[in-house]
Amino acid sequence: SQQGEEDPQALSIQEGENATMNCSYKTSINNLQWYRQNSGRGLVHLILIRSNEREKHSGRLRVTLDTSKKSSSLLITASRAADTASYFCATDRKPHKFYFGSGTKLNVKP
Amino acid sequence: EAQVTQNPRYLITVTGKKLTVTCSQNMNHEYMSWYRQDPGLGLRQIYYSMNVEVTDKGDVPEGYKVSRKEKRNFPLILESPSPNQTSLYFCASSQGASPLHFGNGTRLTVT
């Protein structure tokens, strides 16, 4: 069964705008991670947030985690055309059992 | 360069013809796993391995086998492929609680 679900499924914005993607999950987790995938290629890790953390930043990325609502959000600020990709959240309900959502497809128009 | 290497990149085969997809990592990672990616379903874990000779089922193990005889290699075996195994497959590795490193994928078509 799937653990993480991203929302929206697709998002189209102009370059320079911010992009926000959400992830909801069903059971308690140890960590939540966000990955990026370019057009059928392998996933690339973006950021990991632990269950006892509420917010984390990495460059133009900001991730929040609300364990009471079982949800996380990924904010990409000042988006660029090169940010066009699919973004996935992954949760680990127990060690090494990772659950990925179906992803948010982001299109950043130049 | 640290990487996870999968081969082949593309594979077209017929129902019932045994095949193996190889996966190798050069980072001395203990943990390796296989996923399949299907439209609208995200990535689903097939099998994973915590170390040499230690493997366990993921969420969709039916029709697949794996082995972990060496730390660096984790092949995925389809003894009798069927059309519902047509998918994009990814191998990944990690060490401890570190993030997953993914290979570039194998696109399998079973006719």
Image (cartoon, coloured by chain):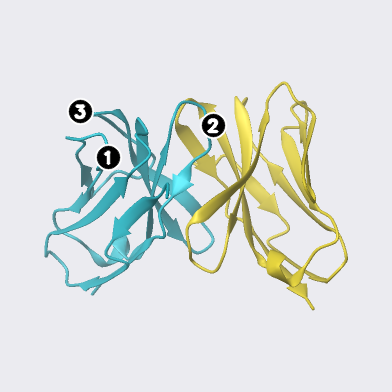
Chain colours: A yellow, B cyan
What is the chain identity of the residue bearing mark 3? B
Q: Earlier in the sequence, mark 1 or mark 3?
A: 3
For residue B103, above or below residue A106: above
Cα–Cα gap, marks 1 and 3: 12 Å
Q: Which mark is residue B7?
A: none
Residue A104, x across and y down, in percent: 66, 59
1 or 3: mark nearer the eye: 1
Residue A33, x across and y down, in percent: 62, 39
Q: State left or right for residue A95 relative to residue B86.
A: right
The local secondary structure at tag 2 comes to strand
What is the chain identity of the residue bearing mark 2? A
Q: Which residue is mark 1?
A: B72
Q: Which residue is found at the position 54% from the left and 31% from the top?
A: A92
Q: Which residue is mark 3?
A: B53
Cα–Cα gap, marks 1 and 2: 23 Å
Q: State left or right for residue B4 relative to residue A29.
A: left
Please name the amino acid that badge 1 sits on.
Arg
Q: Which residue is found at the position 26% from the left and 46% from the top?
A: B62
What is the chain identity of the residue bearing mark 1? B
Q: Which mark is residue A92?
A: 2
Q: Which residue is found at the position 72% from the left and 32% from the top?
A: A70
Q: Residues within 10 Å of mark 1 (few under 14, many from 20)?
A: many
Q: Which residue is found at the position 80% from the left and 51% from the top?
A: A60
